[in-house]
Amino acid sequence: MTAPSRGLADVVAASTAISDIDGLAGRLSYRGYDIHDLGGQVSFEETVYLLQRGNLPTRSELDGLTEQLASARDLTPLVATFLPGIAGRAAPMEALRSLLSLVGHDDPDKDDNGAGANARKAVRLVGVMPTLISCYEAARTGRDVPAPDPQLGVAGNFLLQITGRTPAPEAVAAFDECLVLHADHTMNASTFAARVCAATLSDMHSAVVAAVATLKGPLHGGANEAVMRTLESIDGVDAVPGAVRDILGSGQKIMGFGHRVYRTEDPRATHLRRLSESMGRLAGDTRWYEMSVAMEQAVMAEKGLYPNVDFFAASVYRSLGIPTDLFTPVFAVSRMAGWTAHVMEQHADNRLIRPDSDYIGERDRRVVPIDQRG
C-alpha cells in the first residue's frame, strides 16, 4: 500500500482555471497572465475582474466593477451594531472572522448559490473587506474613519482610512501592486478550506469565513507580522548577520523564507523587494529595507533559502503606515478576490471533496463491561 502524502503534498485536489504555479521555474500566473506582466501594470480592480470573471476588463467593464465595489463599502447593519464590542475584545483575525459572518446575515443573496448571486456576493465581499478592517482599527483606537474619496480606488481608500491622511500617489500605486501580488495562489490552505466548504454546497460567506479561519493559523497567515517583529528585535543593519546565526543556532525558524512550492525565488518577492526600497525612500526611512536585504543575504548564506511573499511585504506595509497586527488582515483584503473566484468555480462544477485516510490506530479491540475495567 502506498504511504499517504503528509499534508497532501503533491496531491492534485482540484482542477482550476484561476491560477497556476511552476515551482521549479518560479512562475505564477492568473488566468494565463504571468505575475510579472500583471504586477505594476494592472490595477487591483482589474485583477478582481480577471479572477472572478475570467478576462481582463474593458474600460466600461472596469468602470462598472469600480462602481459596484464602491457601493459595497458601507458596513452592513449587523456589522455596524456589533463592531464596537468585537473591536474591544477580539484580535484582528478573530474580529475579521466574526465580522464576515455578520456580513453574510445581511446579504440579500445569502441563500442563493447560483452564478448570478455568487457574482454579486463576490464583488460585495471584496468591496466591504477594507472597510471592515479600517473601521475595526478606528473602533479600537477611538478615532473616526475618514469618508472614502471617490477619486481613489480600493488601495487608496484603504490607506486613507487606516492612516487618516490622503496617501501619496506613489504609495497608492505600491499598495495596489501588493494587492495584485497577493490576490491568488492556487491551492493554498485557506483557498482549499474555502473550496472544501463550498463543495458541500454551503454558501459563499461560509466558505470565505472558513478561509479566514484557516489564514488565522500561524503556519499559513501571520508570517509577515512575524518578519516585522523579528526586524524590530534587531539593533540595526550591522547586527543582522549575528542575529540570524543566533536565531538559527537556537533551532528557531526565521519567518518569511522558504516555500512549500517554490524551489527558487518567489516571483512576488521580486516585486516586493523593489517596493520595499521605494516605499522606504518615500517614508524617509530605509532602515527596514536595508535590514531586510541584510537578513536575506544572511539567511541565504546560512541556509540557502530564498525569501517568500511575506518577507519584503512586512517592510512595505510598515513604510505605508499599516499597523503590524493588521498585516494578515490586509493579506485577506487581497486574497478575497481569489477566494471568491474559487468558490464560484467550485459551485459551477461541484463534487463533494472527501479524501480518504490511513488508519493507524489499534484494531480488533473488544468491549469489556465497565465494572470489569481496571
Image: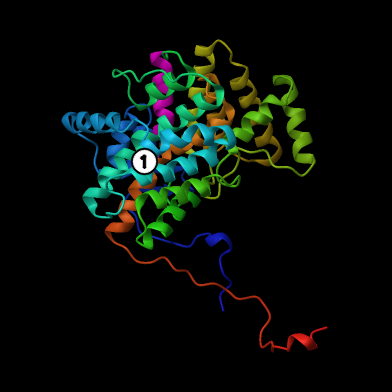
Secondary structure beneath disc 1?
Answer: helix
Q: Is residue 163 left or right of residue 227?
A: left
Q: Quadrant of residue 161?
A: top left
Q: Position of residue 3 (x, y in %)?
A: 58, 72
For this orientation, the residue located farthest to the front is 81
Q: Does the magenta stretch include residue 170?
A: yes
Q: Where is residue 299 in the image (x, y as percent from the top left)?
A: 67, 35
Q: Around disc 1, counting alpha carbons within 10 Å, would you say few (fewer than 14), some (14 to 19), or many (20 or more)?
A: many
Depth check: 252 or 147 in front?
Answer: 147
Answer whether residue 188 is visible to the viewer in this image. no
- The foreground one among 87 and 345 is 87
> At label 1, which amino acid type do we have?
Ala
189 vs 48, left or right, is: right
For label 1, the residue is 337
Q: Is the magenta stretch mostly helix, strand or loop?
A: helix
Q: Bounds of the magenta span?
A: 168-184
Query: Closer to the camera, 65 or 13?
Result: 65
Query: The N terminus appears in which quarter of the rendering?
Result: bottom right
Q: What's the residue at 41%, 25% (across, down)? A: 158
Compared to residue 290, the image places residue 370 above or below, namely below
Q: Residue furthest top?
A: 284
- The spot of residue 181 in percent (x, y) is 42, 35
Residue at 59% across, 36% down = 89
The relative height of residue 14 versus residue 296 in the rendered view (above or below) is below
Is residue 287 visible to us here? yes
